[in-house]
Image (cartoon, helix red, strand yellow):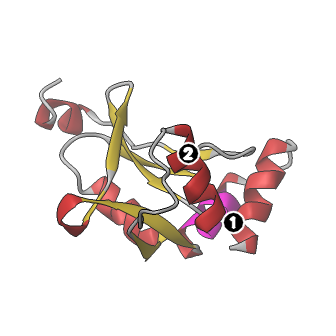
Amino acid sequence: MGTLRAEIDAFYTGFGDPTALEAAFRAAVLLVPLAEGNRIRISEFGGVEWICAFTGVEPYARWLSRRGELDTADEYPYHTLSGWRLADYAAGCVKPTGVTVDITGPAPMAFPPTVTEASDAAAGA
């Protein structure tokens, strides 16, 4: 996980390398919240669906807290998935879907979907 955080930090300081950032994301193992039925939880914002992934339990708890969903008596299921699996899953979705990493942290990172005319038509745009 250190490599991904280091690449994100480099991006924020103005010295990021997009290729290295993408490679670090694809190699990282991330926590992904689950919805009912053991499915990946997806949020929608701005007409794009987003998979929120986290570099650890603390960033995941921060996200839940900011959403008003954190109760220390509850359990919050998640899967650990490789970034490349998340990217491949997002690319295969009908609606444009991206991945965010530590979205409520001090240095969030978004990997937006690649949108083409074909995916716009399939999504009903």
Q: Can residue 81 be seen here?
A: yes
Q: Earlier in the sequence, mark 1 or mark 2?
A: 1
Residue 107 relative to residue 71: left or right = right
Image coords of residue 116 (percent x, y): 29, 36
Quadrant of the rendering where the N terminus is positioned: bottom right
Quadrant of the rendering where the C terminus is positioned: top left
- Picture quarter containing residue 123? top left
Image coords of residue 33 (percent x, y): 40, 61
Read off the magenta span: 19-25
Quickly name the residue at label 1.
Answer: 4
Residue 38 relative to residue 44: left or right = left
Say which amino acid is labelled 2.
Ser
Residue, x 19% and y 37% (percent of image)? 118
In the foreground, 71 or 25: 71
Category of crowding for the residue at label 2, using alpha-carbon neighbours closer than 10 angstroms: few (below 14), some (14–19), many (at least 20)? few
Q: Is residue 124 above or below residue 6?
A: above
* Residue 80 part of the magenta-drawn span: no
Quickly name the residue at label 2.
Answer: 65
Q: Is residue 118 above or below residue 16?
A: above
Residue 98 relative to residue 10: left or right = left
Q: Can residue 16 be seen here?
A: no
Considering the numbered disc 2 on the image, is that residue within a helix, a strand or a loop? helix
* Dominant secondary structure, magenta: helix
Say which amino acid is labelled 1.
Leu
- Picture quarter containing residue 74? bottom left
